[in-house]
Amino acid sequence: MKIVLVFFAVLGSQPIILVSDRVPHLNVEALCKDTTAVDQAMKLSNAQSLGACMRDENAAQQQLDSVWQTTSISIRDRCEGEAVAGGFQSYVDLLTCIQMADDANSLSSPTSLRGASKNRNNK
């Protein structure tokens, strides 16, 4: 019993920050460097620069900061897994996944559409 009390006393004196309560730290520079190299190797006429890629990733991270707390934990966990899959990490992918999940959830709510029914006026 004393061990449990000591554990809670130590735990209570430490600030607790849940990892899932913050936007995860992603290494997006590796993604941007690789994307830029591939674009250059393919000689794309409208290739994205490293700076433009980093700006997009930083903008997505800022948007995530504003929506992270209001997004359900299950969606955050699922989308974080998708955003780091394949060895590359992307805030743009994470934000897109969360936005798509939010859109899907808003579409799944039932509507009160009545449609064209020959029995509609009989009620």
Image (cartoon, rainbow, N blue to C red):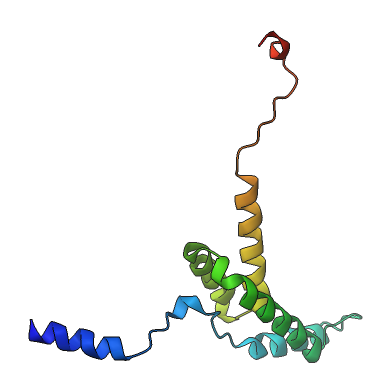
Q: How far across and down, in percent of the image, does residue 59 sit?
A: 73, 81
Decide which of 11, 24 is in the foreground and name it. Answer: 11
Residue at 51 percent across and 63 percent down: it is 72
Question: At which x and y percent is residue 27?
Answer: 60, 88
Residue projecting furthest to the right: 45
Q: How many marks?
A: 0
> Looking at the figure, which quarter contains the C terminus?
top right
Give the residue displayed 66% in from the left and 80% down from the top. Answer: 61
The image shows residue 95, relative to residue 88, as above or below, that is above
Give the percent coordinates (x, y) of residue 117.
72, 16
**Residue drawn at x 60%, y 43% as measured from the top left:** 109
Name the quadrant containing residue 118: top right
Is 85 rendered above or below residue 32?
A: above
Query: Which residue corresponds to the image point at 60% horizontal and 81% vertical from the top-left?
Result: 88
Give the quadrant of residue 66.
bottom right
Residue 41 lies left or right of residue 99; in this view the side is right
Quadrant of the rendered structure where residue 17 is? bottom left
Q: Nearer the viewer, residue 59 or 8?
A: 8
Asked if 49 appears above or below 85 in the picture, the reply is below
Q: As rendered, which of 18 and 42 lies closer to the eye?
A: 18
Residue at the farthest top position: 122
Q: Position of residue 99 (x, y in %)?
A: 66, 63
Report the residue that reaches farthest toward the left. 1
Left or right relative to 20: residue 88: right
Quadrant position of the N terminus in the picture: bottom left
